Image (tube, rainbow, N blue to C red):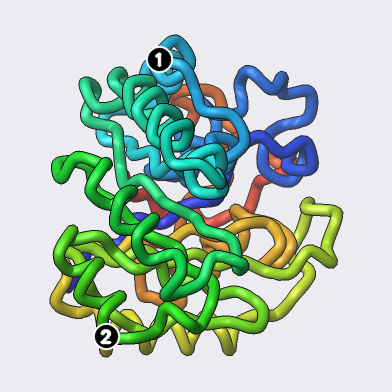
Amino acid sequence: MPEYWLGCSGWAYDDWVGPFYPSGTAPGEFLERYARAFRTVEVDSSFYRPPTAFLTRRWAERTPDGFRFALKVPRDVTHATEEAPSLEALRAFLAGLSPLRSAGKLGPLVLQFPASFRAPSGRSRLERLLAEVPNDYALAVELRHGSWWVPPTRRLLEGRRAALVWSVLPATEPPAWVTAEFAYARFVGDRALTKFDRIQRDRSGDIDRWRRRFEDEARAVGTIYGYANNHFMGFGPGTVAAIALALGEPAPDLARAARAPGQRTLEPGSPADGAGREERF
């Protein structure tokens, strides 16, 4: 059976202070506390601003051994209209990840393309970017337009051993292709929700459908990465807990984010008290 790595898309949300992080938590403490409850995260901020080596070194220092960061490739790469600047931006981005690689904490990189990126006009550009990312980087590709769901796309991804991102997105759903040694799923909702302090939507039917997809289509892969953003159900940490339970995985102990290092339980009445206690790292 595959090993699941489940986490949130990002960790720096002020709305999580209270329901996940303890009241008064400074933003500089968010990552360290997040990593007490989860063992992986998808970095959304790298899409907008590539992290420097100084920053990724701090991330590595503030997370436990075995923690994994999946990062979105910057939009200067995936959304650029000219090839030379996009390749230069890609190389600079990869150079900034060296501390995470050295620490053994670098998970997959994600090429996230816009819905306007279509086949066959975009195929040559996709080919160039796949070739530019060295093969020793785990790579996932998020394509958001149905024009890509054709055999040549599958062969292209298989040739690079790049995973097709299985996105739970409004109005589109990629096919259940397994094109790499791992699978990568993103639980993404619409943008209607603007407050992210609690579960606000029942998506149990969608989660169960994706559980069956994992069991039927991804049973032969070694690893399945799954990341939930706040928009899917309203509260990323609670969404990941619901996904884990549906998959029969140990539920993340969300209360760990509110405890001091080494503290086994919370004081009665603490914000996250009562969250699942089963731990897995």
Dot 1 crowding, Cα within 10 Å, few <14, some 14–19, many 20+? some
Image location of residue 153, percent across then percent down: 30, 75
Which residue matches tag 2? 151
**Residue type at the position of mark 2:** Pro
Decide if residue 47 is on the left or right side of residue 264: right
Q: Quadrant of residue 67?
A: top left
Depth check, front residue: 194 or 137: 137
**Label 2, label 1: how far apart the Cα atoms are:** 38 Å
Decide if residue 99 is on the left or right side of residue 21: left
Q: Quadrant of residue 26?
A: top right
Q: Quadrant of residue 259?
A: top right
**Residue type at the position of mark 1:** Ala
Decide if residue 32 is on the left or right side of residue 120: right
Q: Is residue 123 visible?
A: yes
Q: Residue at x 66, y 78 (%)?
A: 170
Secondary element type, mark 2:
helix
Vertical side of 269 occupied by 227: above or below = below
Q: Residue at x 33, y 21 (%)?
A: 95
Vertical side of 230 occupied by 212: above or below = below
Q: Is residue 256 visible?
A: no
Q: Quadrant of the N terminus?
A: bottom left
Q: Residue at x 66, y 34 (%)?
A: 12
Image location of residue 78, percent across then percent down: 50, 48
Farthest top residue?
A: 54
Depth check, front residue: 269 or 233: 233
Dot 2 crowding, Cα within 10 Å, few <14, some 14–19, many 20+? few
Which residue matches tag 1? 53
Image location of residue 248, percent across then percent down: 36, 74
Secondary element type, mark 1:
helix
